[in-house]
Image: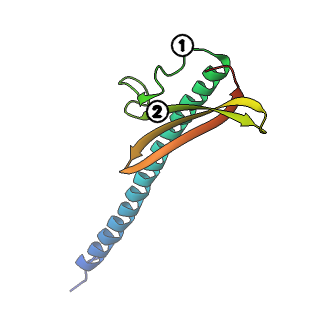
Amino acid sequence: MKRQGGFTLLEVLVAFALLASLLTLILQTQGEQAFFMSKINNQEKVRQELEEQVLALERGDQKLLWKQAQGTFETGHPLAGYRFQRQEQEELLLGQIPVNRATLSISWTEREHPQTYQISFYAPQQGF
């Protein structure tokens, strides 16, 4: 009696187990990469928003400034639901030169972890 060529059941099961392990590893890596790219994208949007606010403050452009000193971005905004805050404080630079210190920050929650991005800068005293 001749033996027929082919795979045994054990060989097929081992091959499926290896394939399942590799696919699990690949999918997990892809999921982590997607989360990381999403996080980078959010941070980029936040950074751009803060830079636009800094430019608006420097130019005195009231149309581009946030309407309130603090609040939440409205629906339709790319950062909808994120919280923003603008603080202005008078200080003496080198103990003699009056300047305004502006601090702009945006806060949000990502996977139940609070995140904050903040920019602070000095400007001549002229009122924001």
Please name the amino acid that badge 2 sits on: Phe
**Percent position of residue 127, x then y:** 63, 20
User: How many marks overall?
Assistant: 2
- Which label is found at residue 63? 1
Q: How many angstroms separate mark 1 from mark 2 (CA)? A: 17 Å
User: What is the secondary structure assignment of the residue under circle 2?
Assistant: strand
Residue lying at the far left in this picture: please name it: 1
Say left or right for 111 vs 66: left
Q: Is residue 47 visible?
A: yes
**Percent position of residue 8, x then y:** 26, 78
**Percent position of residue 100, x then y:** 66, 29
Please name the amino acid that badge 1 sits on: Lys
Q: Quadrant of the N terminus?
A: bottom left
Of the two numbered discs 1 and 2 on the same chain, state the one appearing first in sequence: 1
Q: Quadrant of residue 9?
A: bottom left
- Depicted 41 relative to depicted 52: above or below: below
Q: Residue at x 41, y 29 (%)?
A: 71
**Percent position of residue 84, x then y:** 46, 33
Residue that carries the numbered disc 2 in the rendered image: 84
- The 10 Å Cα crowd at callout 1, few under 14, some 14 to 19, many 20 or more, is few
Q: Quadrant of residue 72?
A: top left
Q: Is residue 6 visible?
A: no
Q: Residue at x 26, y 79 (%)?
A: 10
Q: Nearer the viewer, residue 39 or 73?
A: 73
